[in-house]
Image (spheres, grey):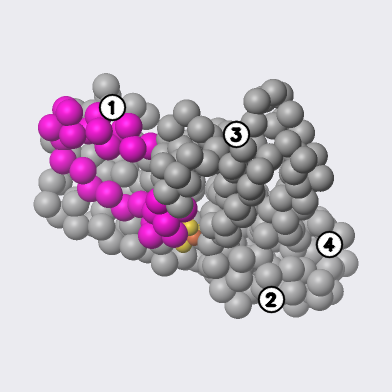
Amino acid sequence: MQIRKARETGFCFGVKRALKILEEAIREYGEIETLGRMVHNQQMVDNLSKLGVRVVENLDHVRGNAVVIPSHGVRPQVIEELKARRLGIIDTTCPIVRKAQLTVKELSEKGFGVIIFGDPDHPEVKGMLGWAGERGIATLDAEVISKFDKLPRHLGLLSQTTRDPAQFAHFANDFISLFLPRIGELRIVNTLCDVCKRRQATAMELARKVNLMMVVGGRNSANTRCLAEVCSSIGVETHHVETAAEIEDNWLKGRGLVGVTTGTSTPDQVIQQVMVKLKKIKRSLDAA
Ligand code: F3S
């Protein structure tokens, strides 16, 4: 059995940047609170908690004088609320997410309705939607939009940054065939993250060559889930694991080549543990 790791793994620049800002905040404030998780990775959240980082789900739970906004960003109303409460704001919103938010804002200010291709429950999408005021909808299914009997004449269509480009194109096609006769103008803006696009492309390239793919990352991580979907969509057996402990020996029996890829919020320490475990299983299978 051979094991091959994808060309790019581990944190993306947006996560690295956010963690660097957080480190500086820890140095300045000691204990610090983040509004939601910094990254969708339990191991990382546990590590940060040992350094004095506390996750709060809403502003009423804030005890300190300053709050960290995670890389997923927040609604503008949250920023206003933080200012009204005179809390310090340490903003780690990823520049790619910020650009998507500002695109939503600009479209909305020009009178466009905004449709976001994304998971309505994901913090990044909730944040983006907030920049559309009353003029936004987030969904993964174009059919859902038919529930709104009055569509604005001018519409902007964007994506959650971590989505698969092929799925976004598919959604845009569905939208056009269902609704184009009912609207006057449609602007499609590419808000997809290049890091995710590259990682999906290299994961697919690897998945085509191997007998089994291992996708390592948080279960709630949108980009990790997307990687697992694109790998399994090409027909290769794919396992999404959060930690090395979840890997079962029998998955690897009789496999010639195993591929490994990771989400953009998966810590190097977790990737190393996965590689160590895979090599250990390989040794025992080779010896059998
Ligand atoms: Fe930003 Fe893309 Fe990472 S949106 S946080 S660089 S996955």
**Distance between mark 2 and mark 1 Cα atoms:** 44 Å
> Which kind of residue does numbered mark 1 sit on?
Leu
Q: Which residue is mark 2?
A: 4
For the residues marked 1 and 4, what is the alpha-carbon distance in whole angstroms? 43 Å
Q: Main secondary structure of the magenta part?
A: helix
Question: Going by the image, does 67 lie left or right of 98?
Answer: left
Q: Which mark is residue 284?
A: none
Please name the amino acid that badge 2 sits on: Arg
Residue matched to label 3: 152
Q: Look at the picture and state if 244 lies above or below 200.
A: above
- Mark yes or no: residue 191 visible: yes
Indicate yes or no: mark 1 CB to ligand 1 under 8 Å: no
Q: Position of residue 99 (x, y in %)?
A: 42, 56
Earlier residue among tags 3 and 1: 1
Q: Amino acid at mark 4?
A: Ile
Callout 1: helix, strand or loop? Answer: helix
- Residue at the spot 13% in from the left edge and 46% down from the top edge: 29
Q: Residue 72, how many percent across, how many down?
A: 43, 47
Q: Do callouts 4 and 3 mark residues in contact (Cβ within 8 Å)?
A: no
Marks 2 and 4 close (CB-CB < 8 Å): no
Residue 99 counted in the magenta span: yes
Which dot, 2 or 3, sits closer to the camera? 3
- Is residue 47 positioned above or below 273 on the image? above
Q: Amino acid at mark 3?
A: Pro
Q: Nearer the viewer, mark 3 or mark 1?
A: 3
The numbered mark at residue 59 is 1
**Badge 1: few (under 14), some or many (20 or more) residues near its Cα, within 10 Å?**
some
What is the crowding at mark 2: few (fewer than 14 residues within 10 Å), some, or many (at least 20)? Answer: some
Residue that carries the numbered disc 4 in the rendered image? 234
